[in-house]
Image: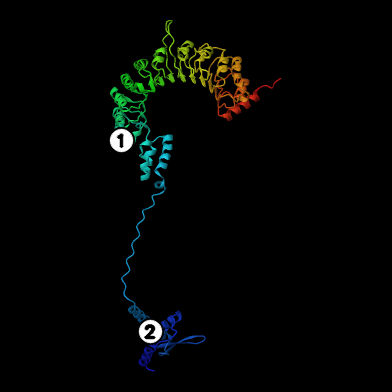
C-alpha cells in the first residue's frame, strides 16, 4: 500500500467511534515513541522479541481510542447545552457576606473582673507598698492599667530620691525630676492617700508638701526622715488642708521648732501621735505640749539623733500628766532625762490612767529612780510594757510597789555598765511572784542577783503544773549567775519558751553559753543541761 493511501486510511480510522474506549496506558505511550505516526515504520511484537519493521503497518488501537474519546466529549457538551436551554433563567446568587473579623484574644489578664484584680492588687500593696508594683502592673494591659490607677490602692506611699553616689547638684536635679512626675500623679492617684513618708529630700520638700495639701485631703500620717527646709508656712498649710492629719514624725530631720509649734497649735486638738528628735529646740515643742496644746495625744516619743546629745532633758512629770492626760505610749529613748524634783509642797499629779507602754531605755546611766518611777506610774493600772534598760537606780522593791498587776514585758537589762555599779544581789523574787502568770518577756541581763536568789525567783514559773498557765516566751539571762539546774527547771516548766539568752553566764558549762532561738534549740539546750548535771546521790 502506498504511503498516501495508508495515511488516509489512518485518518478514516481515527474518526470512527469505538465503544468501550479506554484511557491511554503506558504501553501505548511507548509504542508511539518507538514508531511514531508517519515515520514509515511499525511495531510487531512476538513472544520473545519486539520488531520494528518498515512500512505503515496496521491501524493501531491508539487512533481508535482517541477518536472514541473525542466523540464522547462532543456528546457530553451537546447534552449540557440542551439542559441549560431547558432550565429557566434565575437571578444570580448574592455574593456571600464576609464574616466579621474577630479581634485577637486579649489574654487571661483582660478576662479577670476588675473587682478581683483590685483585691489581688490590694494584698500585694499591703505587703510591699504601691511602688514599684502598681507602676509595672499598669503596663501589662488596659484592664490592669485601669485597676492600678484606682486611688484606693494608693493609700500608703514612701517617696525617696536615689542617693547612691549622687553629688549635691545632681541630687537637686533628681528631686526636681521626681517632683515633675508627682505633679501629674497626685491629682489622679493620691486623692485617697492616708500615710506619706518622705526620705532624704534636701531641696524640694516645700513643693512636695504643697502638692500634698492640694491633692491629699484624707492624709492622716506624715513622716519626714532626713529632710531639710521645712518651714512653718508649709506645715500650717498642710494642717489646714488635711483635716484628718493626726500623726507627725520628724525624727532625724532638720525642722524648725517654730514650724512644729505652729503645726501643733493648728492641728493640736486632733493630734494623736508625735515623734521628735531631741535637740536644743525640743524644749519649745515640749512646752507647747505641757500647755495642753494636744489634749488627745496618745503617743509621744523623744529620742536622740545619730549624734548622741549629752544635754540633760528636763521634763516635769506632773505638768506632762496634766497636758497629755490620754497618753498611752511614752518613750524617752537614750536620753539623759533629769526629772524636776517634786518638792515637799508639790501635790501628786493625776498620773497617766491610760498608759500601756513606758520606755526609758538608755545606753548610759540616767537619773531615773524609784521615786521618779512612782511619780510616773502611780495612776497607771493598765501598764503592759515597762522598758527600764540602763536604769540602774531602779530596785525590785520599787517595781513591786507599782499598781500595774498584768505586766507582760519587763526589761531591766544593764548593757556594758554593770561592772562599775553596785547592784542589788537580792529581790528578784519580788518581780516573778507578782507577774509570773502574765509575763511574756523578761530581761535580767547584767543584773547582779546571786545564784540562790535567781533560783528562787525563776522557781515561781513552776507554780502552774506543766506550765499550762505560763505565758513566758522570752527570757534573757545574759551575764547573770544562773545555774544549770535553774535553767533546766525553767525550760521544763515553760513549754512556750522561744528565746533564751545564756551568753556570758559564768555558772554554766562551756558550749552552752549562747542564745537559743526557736523551740528546737531550746529543747536541745535542755537535753545538754540534763546531761551535764551530776546524778542525784
SS at circle 1: helix
Depth check: give the residue in front, 318 or 138: 318
| Residue 354 x, y percent position in the rendering | 45, 19
* Relative height, residue 480 to residue 96 (above, below): above
**N-terminal of the two: label 2 or label 1?**
2
Q: CA distance from mark 2 to mark 1?
A: 90 Å
Q: Is any atom of residue 138 visible in this view?
A: no
Q: Quadrant of residue 136?
A: top left
What is the residue that sits farthest to the bottom in this orientation?
Answer: 1
Q: Are marks 2 and 1 in contact (CB under 8 Å)?
A: no
Q: Is residue 161 left or right of residue 525?
A: left
Q: Which mark is residue 187?
A: 1
| Residue 495 x, y percent position in the rendering | 59, 27
| Residue 346 x, y percent position in the rendering | 42, 7
SS at circle 2: helix
Q: Is residue 401 left or right of residue 334?
A: right
What is the residue that sits farthest to the right in this orientation?
Answer: 537
What residue is rendered at 65% in x and 23% in y?
532
Depth check: give the residue in front, 445 or 39: 445
Q: Which residue position holds label 2?
A: 71
On-image quarter of the N terminus: bottom left
Q: Residues within 10 Å of mark 2 (few under 14, many from 20)?
A: some
On-image quarter of the C terminus: top right
Q: Which mark is residue 203?
A: none
Color encoding of the figure: rainbow
* Relative height, residue 504 to residue 123 (above, below): above
What residue is rendered at 31% in x and 75% in y?
89
| Residue 306 x, y percent position in the rendering | 39, 21
Q: Residues within 10 Å of mark 1 (few under 14, many from 20)?
A: some
Q: Quadrant of residue 246?
A: top left
What is the residue that sits farthest to the top in this orientation?
Answer: 344
Q: Is any atom of residue 167 visible in this view?
A: yes
Amino acid at each position: 500500500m502506498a504511503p498516501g493511501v495508508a495515511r488516509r486510511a489512518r485518518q478514516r480510522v481515527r474518526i470512527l467511534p469505538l465503544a468501550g474506549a479506554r484511557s491511554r496506558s503506558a504501553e501505548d505511550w511507548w509504542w508511539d515513541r518507538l514508531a511514531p505516526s508517519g515515520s514509515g515504520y511499525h511495531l510487531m511484537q512476538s513472544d520473545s522479541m519486539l520488531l520494528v519493521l518498515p512500512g505503515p503497518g496496521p491501524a493501531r488501537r491508539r487512533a481508535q481510542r482517541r477518536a472514541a474519546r473525542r466523540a464522547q466529549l462532543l456528546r457530553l457538551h451537546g447534552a449540557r447545552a440542551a439542559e441549560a436551554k431547558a432550565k429557566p433563567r434565575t437571578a444570580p446568587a448574592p455574593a456571600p457576606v464576609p464574616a466579621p473579623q474577630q479581634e485577637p484574644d486579649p489574654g487571661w489578664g483582660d478576662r479577670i473582673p476588675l473587682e478581683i484584680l483590685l483585691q489581688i492588687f490590694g494584698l500585694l500593696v499591703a505587703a510591699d507598698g504601691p511602688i514599684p508594683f502598681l507602676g509595672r502592673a499598669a503596663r501589662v494591659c488596659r484592664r490592669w492599667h485601669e485597676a492600678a490607677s484606682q486611688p484606693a490602692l494608693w493609700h500608703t506611699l514612701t517617696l525617696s530620691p536615689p542617693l547612691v553616689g549622687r553629688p549635691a547638684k545632681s541630687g537637686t536635679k533628681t528631686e526636681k525630676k521626681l517632683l515633675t512626675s508627682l505633679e501629674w500623679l497626685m491629682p489622679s492617684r493620691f486623692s485617697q492617700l492616708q500615710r506619706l513618708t518622705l526620705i532624704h529630700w534636701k531641696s524640694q520638700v516645700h513643693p512636695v508638701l504643697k502638692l500634698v495639701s492640694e491633692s491629699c485631703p484624707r492624709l492622716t500620717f506624715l513622716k519626714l526622715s532626713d529632710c531639710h527646709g521645712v518651714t512653718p508656712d508649709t506645715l500650717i498649710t498642710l494642717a489646714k488642708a488635711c483635716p484628718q492629719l493626726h500623726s507627725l514624725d520628724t525624727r532625724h530631720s532638720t525642722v524648725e521648732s517654730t514650724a512644729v509649734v505652729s503645726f501643733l497649735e493648728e492641728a493640736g486638738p486632733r493630734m494623736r501621735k508625735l515623734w521628735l528628735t531631741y535637740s536644743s529646740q525640743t524644749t519649745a515643742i515640749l512646752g507647747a505640749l505641757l500647755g495642753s496644746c494636744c489634749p488627745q495625744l496618745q503617743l509621744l516619743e523623744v529620742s536622740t539623733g545619730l549624734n548622741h546629745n549629752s544635754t540633760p532633758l528636763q521634763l516635769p512629770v506632773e505638768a506632762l500628766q496634766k497636758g497629755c492626760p490620754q497618753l498611752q505610749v511614752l518613750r524617752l529613748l537614750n536620753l539623759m532625762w533629769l526629772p524636776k524634783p517634786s518638792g515637799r509642797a508639790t501635790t501628786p499629779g493625776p498620773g497617766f490612767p491610760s498608759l500601756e507602754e513606758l520606755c526609758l531605755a538608755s545606753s548610759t546611766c540616767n537619773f531615773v529612780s524609784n521615786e521618779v518611777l512612782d511619780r510616773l506610774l502611780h495612776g497607771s493600772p493598765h501598764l503592759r510594757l515597762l522598758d527600764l534598760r540602763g536604769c540602774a537606780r531602779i530596785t525590785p522593791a520599787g517595781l513591786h510597789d507599782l499598781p500595774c498587776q498584768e505586766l507582760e514585758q519587763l526589761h531591766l537589762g544593764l548593757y556594758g555598765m554593770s561592772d562599775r555599779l553596785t547592784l542589788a544581789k537580792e529581790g528578784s523574787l519580788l518581780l516573778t511572784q507578782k507577774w509570773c502568770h502574765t509575763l511574756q518577756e523578761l530581761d535580767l541581763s547584767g543584773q547582779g542577783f546571786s545564784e540562790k536568789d535567781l533560783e528562787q525567783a525563776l522557781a515561781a514559773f513552776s507554780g502552774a503544773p506543766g506550765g499550762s498557765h505560763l505565758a513566758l516566751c522570752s527570757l534573757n539571762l545574759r551575764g547573770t549567775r544562773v545555774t544549770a539546774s535553774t535553767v533546766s527547771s525553767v525550760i521544763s516548766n515553760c513549754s512556750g519558751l522561744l528565746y533564751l539568752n545564756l551568753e556570758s553566764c559564768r555558772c554554766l558549762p562551756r558550749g552552752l553559753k549562747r542564745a537559743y532561738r526557736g523551740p528546737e534549740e531550746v529543747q536541745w539546750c535542755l537535753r545538754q543541761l540534763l546531761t551535764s548535771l551530776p546524778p542525784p546521790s
